[in-house]
Image: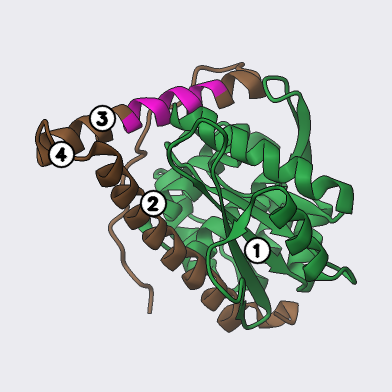
Amino acid sequence: MVRQTVLVPDPVPPLPPGLTVEQRIALWGDLLDACDQLLLAGLRRRIGPDGDLRAAYRESLARQREEHDRMLLGMADRFNRRGGRHGG
Amino acid sequence: MAANVVLAALKHVWTTLAPLRLPMALMGGVALAVWQYVRATRDVDLLVSLGNSDFGLVMARLAAAGIHPKRQPPLVPLGSLQIAQFRYEPPGAFVDVQVDLLLAESDYHRQALVRRVQVHLPDLGMEIHVLGCEDLILHKLLAGRMIDRADAAALLRLNRASLDLAYLHKEVADLGVSVEFGEAWRQAFPDELAPKIE
């Protein structure tokens, strides 16, 4: 049976054509930095002006890492279960 | 800034491991950017083949360079794969960066490392290898989250003209990710039927 899932749209618009690798990585950096600024602003709003922003930031990154770790474990599990034709 | 911290960590880890001459390739956010897709990810994930080398040697080099295991024991066996996670805090940063080594010796992973692509990063003054686009797509399909599926769809659409579709289709079948591939294909090309892969 085909599994149905709801697919998300692209989270970012396409890049301009003809960019070099260096330019694409620079855009990645710009996007990551911009997202980080938004994250910091949101955290500041949540913890208030006297809150420990660095601690809140580290905590937020730790949650992102937990999600990333689950992804890695899931990827390994799927490879082990399905990659039999590769002797995985 | 976050990107500089991630790039500094990538450079430090890569230059630390490079003298060991182990086949390795970047799989994280910067690899997506190399293949024309930009998303705000801060992962430094490396696929590494140890071959006959001793993981203790890798550990020793990383430790000497201030790159420390996230947990003990550092090596987590996951069937035919092993994952080793580390943390490194570049000078001047107030957060560390997680560095994940996916140690894999399967036929598929060895092949993916043979197919890796060298890229020059002028800002870092170095050459690195990234997974080929087809293999990055396959890893995204194996990862299985919606965001990974969206990444796979974007990579398909943005690199269609240069993809080795015969290789991709074969590996989709061998890795058992035909359903996921079909979904990513339909997302990438909504007006087309997905290729039938047995």
Q: Is residue B33 left or right of residue A40?
A: right
Q: Which residue is mark 3?
A: A38
Q: Which residues are magenta?
A: A26-36
Under mark 3, the amino acid is: Leu
What type is the residue that disc 2 sits on?
Ile
A23 versus B165 height, above or below:
above
Q: Is residue B84 visible?
A: yes
Which residue corresponds to mark 2?
B147
- Looking at the image, which residue is at 77% across and 61% down? B60
Residue drawn at 47 percent across, 46 percent down: B151
The label nearer to you, 2 versus 1, is: 1
**Of the residues tagged 4 and 2, which is closer to the observer?**
4
Above or below residue A86? Residue B116 is above
Residue B69 position within the rendered picture, expressed as x and y whole percent measured from the top left: 59, 63
**Secondary structure type for disc 3:** helix
Q: Give chain B's shade.
A: green
Q: Which residue is mark 4?
A: A51
- Label 4: element kind: loop
Q: Is residue B163 visible?
A: no
Badge 2 crowding class, 10 Å Cα cut-off, few under 14, some 14 to 19, many 20 or more, is some
Could you tell me which residue is drawn at 11 percent across and 30 percent down?
A49
Query: How is the protein colored in the picture?
Result: by chain
Q: CA distance from mark 3 to mark 2?
A: 20 Å
Q: CA distance from mark 2 to mark 1?
A: 20 Å
